[in-house]
Amino acid sequence: GLTLLGTSGAANAEKVYRLKMAESWQTNFPIFGDAPRNMAAMAEKMSNGRLKITIDSANKHKAPFGVFDMVRAGQYDMGHSASYYWKGKVPNTLYFTTMPFGMTAPEQYAWFYHGGGMQLMEKVYGKFNLLSFPGGNTSNQMGGWFQKEINSLEDLKGLKMRIPGFAGEVLAKLGASPTNIPPGELYTALERRTIDALEWVGPSLDLRMGFHKIAPYYYTGWHEPATELQFMINKRSWDRLPEDLQEILRVAMRTAAYDMYIQSYHESSENLAVLDSEYPNVKIRTFPEDVMTALRKANDELLAEKAKEDPLAKEILESQANYLKKVRHWTDISDKAYLNSISVSK
Amino acid sequence: MLLKAEKIIDRFSDFLGNVSAIIFLLMLANVFIDVLMRYVFNDVSIAMQEMEWHLYAAMFMLGVPYTLRTGGHVRVDLVYEGLSVKRKSIIDIAGGLLFLLPFCLLVGWYGVGFAHEAYLLGEKSGDPGGLTHRWIIKAVIPFAFFATAVSGVAMILNAIIALKDEHETHSDRGLL
Amino acid sequence: MIGIVMFFVALLMLIFGFPVAFTFGGVALIFGVIAEGPDMFAFMPFRIQSIMENVTLMAVPLFIFMGIVLQKTRLAEQLLEAMGKLFGGVRGGLAISTVLVGALLAASTGVVGASVVAMGLISLPVMLKYNYDKSLACGTICASGTLGQIIPPSIILIILGDVLGIPVGDLFQAAVGPGVVLIGIYVIYILIYSWVKPEAAPALPLDDDVEHRHQMYGRALKAIIPPLALILIVLGSIFAGVATPTESSALGGVGALLLALVYRQFSWKMVFESAQETVKVTAMVFAILLGATAFSMAFSYTGGDYIVEDVLSALPGGTMGFLILSMIAIMILGFFIDFVEISFIIVPILAPVADAMGIAPLWFAILIAMNLQTSFLTPPFGFSLFYLKGVAPAGIKTTDIYRGVIPFILMQVGVVISILLFPEWYGLLD
Ligand code: NA
Ligand code: NA
């Protein structure tokens, strides 16, 4: 819980507010774990030491997927996790991390802060006495490591792939077999071809898993174009903070999220360079057009089903689809056109 | 009277042991079938894969009270081994009242809220085609801990009986 | 400070002989509630669920079942006797066979509880039957059952790879050398021990007549084939990509039932009784895990983790000095903290220092892995010791096990020292 310390007669300004935060990551997990620590350090500095946030990693609380419940129950004041982890408890939390064929990171940030995303997120989380904020972006994730090349839809049939969640559902519609493998056994399973493929994150975090030594194909992404992590706060803990500290916390979270996005971008480029120079045999591939078209069709059908089942899901999906349409037009004639034009002139 | 109460509890613990044994065999078959289906038929069922850990978890959780009843929980016998039946009984009564019962009851108590929460949210697997009704497997936690507390009561009764009559108790808990 | 006091109280309480699992849980409860109030225990269901969902540990009941079926059908006994006889008049043949079977099991799982218990069920009764010294038998089983930690595939190496940022494949490769050395040293130790003390590990009786002896070799080979085939199925299914390491243990269980069928030992009664015993032993192992998770929860939430961090970050410099002190620290912590926690909490504190000193990450990782393996064997909180005690016949005392593992601990420490002094022998420097 939240505790107040400090001299009783002194001004409000001297009170120290302590918040306890649970993260879903193991101690010292790079990038993901840097975001909450960076946030806590900023908040403490900006508040001149009045706001102190301590962070417990998954190895302390042992419940990476229990952060939602623990913050909701007040066992922790805050959490750092990912919204789509809670879709088994609250289905509509799925939409606030990333969606296959969805927005890129800048587009999605624009949707959160200017396109109604934050309000929709509040609609979903408010019922549970929680506040949720963007918590850092991994940038575009890779499509995964494959033992065989995917040349046609036929190659997806019976493909045993470790790919959890909604993207797995999309692949399953095309005849692939999403498979659960505990992370500790992924390496052996892929090496021995117990599974044909798996997805992890991107160069920033994949290289330490060693997959590049055992799988020849690294596919570009389609299913997690902008994975956004999440800060969540118990509403009671939030309400107990004075207004200035609330604002400091808000700014610290937003800045830490941005910092994580650029850190991911940097680490991915660094690690990709390592991959290029030290493992030239790894072939980077993109799914052929007919596969992409079929995946997209399956994705649309599944989303239509979700929208039919739940009016709030419909509202969120429509908001995302409408915003994407508008913002992508700008992306196309700004970044995309720029990249296309300069690659032609090279 | 004590003996009768102990016997009834023991029968309950034995019943849980039998249930666990059946669950274990189901789990063995489940894993085997999953491997076979994936390797031979390239067919993977997320529900069946999740059923593996549901069965496995239920098996060892429900096995804990049964193992207590059969005296299967490890003891460090540096001192215990050489003690008289009377002293052993005192250790079991004290340990039961001080350690086992409070621990099981407190964890069981918090387990109720934990499972209830899952029930209220209608929690299910986050993976496509996964199992629904997550509250059932979560409810195994309070159930198993309460059952272990009940089995612990039988252990204490057994020790009381042994304390009264230092020669015989009807069940073998490693006491005699 | 509470964490340290709690540790010694638990130690004292364990000696009274109340079941280990509930002593851990009860001590954690008393200290946790006094220090932080009962609400700390609201974390327990989450911790229990993470054990329930840890399917890697599913290998524990499955290997136990395989072991029990092999034991009930006497197939395991025949295997070990046959292997013992193949080593001819060599004393200690049974113990050497145990080490070799343990090494094979180790290559198919990284879960220590599974192989210690399976080995305890399979080879302890046989060694006792042939009048082996209890301590030697227990020490051999604990040590060879714990090999799964260092011989790939191994959970600990995967976790260390993640924490230290080393590709798992490199680690697996690097661990093979030290693992083989360890096996070799165990075998040499058993040979010397049984040469010095023949009554501790008697050779199996052999026929004097040469012709009979040839027949015996034939019989021995026949007895070895089925269980060995089983182990090969388990290993083979991993290497051929048929099953994950965890799933392969289920193939082992089903395979054991098929063998029982082939050797006309199968009955539904046998199957159900084996399942019942499996439940009993599995619940024993997991109850310890449940008690231990309460203990480590109370330890860390009352500030124990900060004490550990402070002590470690104050370790003095100098490459050798740092390595030696951090190895000693890890070994001491291994007395009461689970290896997963050591890897995630302790190693990240030490890793940057090691990095700054230019210590090769592979070298550091293998040192830690060997060290953690040793911590499974160290009394009083060595998990392997509890597991073996849980399946050992009534005549085996805790003291037999403690006495038995000491030489093996010393051998392990010796190997750790050799890695420390001569990493180039093991190819750990590039
Ligand atoms: Na292993
Ligand atoms: Na230990």
Image (cartoon, coloured by chain):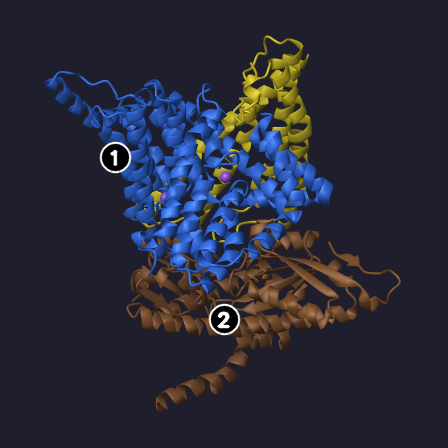
Q: Residues within 10 Å of mark 1 (few under 14, many from 20)?
A: some
Q: Amino acid at mark 1?
A: Ala
Look at the numbered disc 2 and give the secondary structure of its residue.
Answer: helix
**Label 2: chain letter:** A
Of all residues shown, which one is farthest toward the bottom?
A345
Q: CA distance from mark 1 to mark 2?
A: 49 Å
In-front residue for pair A301/B14: B14
Image region (quadrant) for ligand 1: top left
Decide: marks 1, 2 in contact (CB < 8 A)? no
Quadrant containing the N terminus of chain C is top right
Q: Residue at x 67, y 37 (%)?
A: C29
Q: Is residue C114 above or below residue A36?
A: above
Q: Residue at x 31, y 48 (%)?
A: C176
Residue C127, by quadrant, is: top left
**Label 1: chain letter:** C
In-front residue for pair B28/C26: C26
Residue tagged 1: C229
Chain B colour as displayed: yellow
**Residue C416, image x, y percentages:** 39, 46
In-front residue for pair C288/C194: C194
In-front residue for pair A28/C11: C11
Chain A colour as displayed: brown
Quadrant containing the C terminus of chain C is bottom left
**Residue A257, image x, y percentages:** 59, 70
Q: Amino acid at mark 2?
A: Ser
Of all residues shown, which one is farthest toward the right?
A9
Can residue A330 be seen from the camera position used here? yes
**In blue, which chain?**
C
Residue tagged 2: A264
